Each structure stands twice: as structure tokens, then as C-alpha cells.
Image (tube, rainbow, N blue to C red):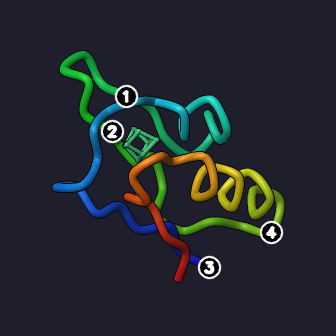
Amino acid sequence: MKIVLDRPRCEGHGLCEEAAPQLMHLDDEGELVLDSEQVGEADAAAAHAAVRVCPVAALRIV
Ligand code: SF4
């Protein structure tokens, strides 16, 4: 499982970071950084939560 960011869509709300802080964070400029595109089973629920919570649908799981 992989998490993919559509960067032009991302508005830096950071809600995804709250849902999955182990997978992503906002950098000092407010740009979202995926710490790892590969998502293990242990983080699958958090990854799905991050996708659901994004208000502009900038994240998806493939
Ligand atoms: S919640 Fe969506 S818009 Fe906000 S930082 Fe995450 S991916 Fe970007």
C-alpha cells in the first residue's frame, strides 16, 4: 500500500498530519512532506483516516 499526494491540490491544512503523524508532517514552509510513501499494515488505518480527513482530496491510497 502506498500513499500519494497530489501536491497542487494540497492547501496545507495539516489535518492529515493530525490523523497520521507517523506518516506525514508539514515542514517549516507549510508544505506537506510524506515521511514514507510506503504504508505498512500497522499504519493502514491512520493512512485511510488521513485520506478521509483531507478537505480537498489531495491524498489517495494506491
Ligand atoms: S489535509 Fe489535505 S490539504 Fe491539508 S495538508 Fe493534508 S493533504 Fe494537504
Task: Give the CA separation, mark 4 to mark 1.
Answer: 23 Å
Task: Give the CA separation, mark 2 to mark 4.
Answer: 22 Å
Q: Against 30, is 49 above or below?
A: below
Secondary structure at badge 2 equals strand
Quick one: label 3 or label 4, which is nearer the N terminus?
Answer: 3
Q: Which residue is mark 3?
A: 1
- Under mark 3, the amino acid is Met
Task: Give the CA separation, mark 3 to mark 2.
Answer: 19 Å
Q: Quadrant of ligand 1?
A: top left
Quick one: label 2 or label 1, which is nearer the N terminus?
Answer: 1
Q: Which residue is mark 1?
A: 26
Residue at 50 percent of width and 67 percent of height? 3
Where residue 41 is drawn, which disc sits there? 4
Q: Against 39, is 56 above or below?
A: above
Residue 21 or 12: which is nearer the viewer? 12
Q: Position of residue 50 (x, y in %)?
A: 61, 50
Secondary structure at badge 4 equals helix
Q: Position of residue 41 (x, y in %)?
A: 80, 69
Q: Nearer the viewer, mark 3 or mark 2?
A: 2
Q: Residues within 10 Å of mark 4 (few under 14, many from 20)?
A: few
- Under mark 1, the amino acid is Leu
Q: Which residue is mark 2?
A: 32
Q: Is mark 1 within 8 Å of ligand 1?
A: yes
Secondary structure at badge 3 equals loop
Q: Is mark 3 within 8 Å of ligand 1?
A: no
Q: Against 35, is 3 above or below?
A: below
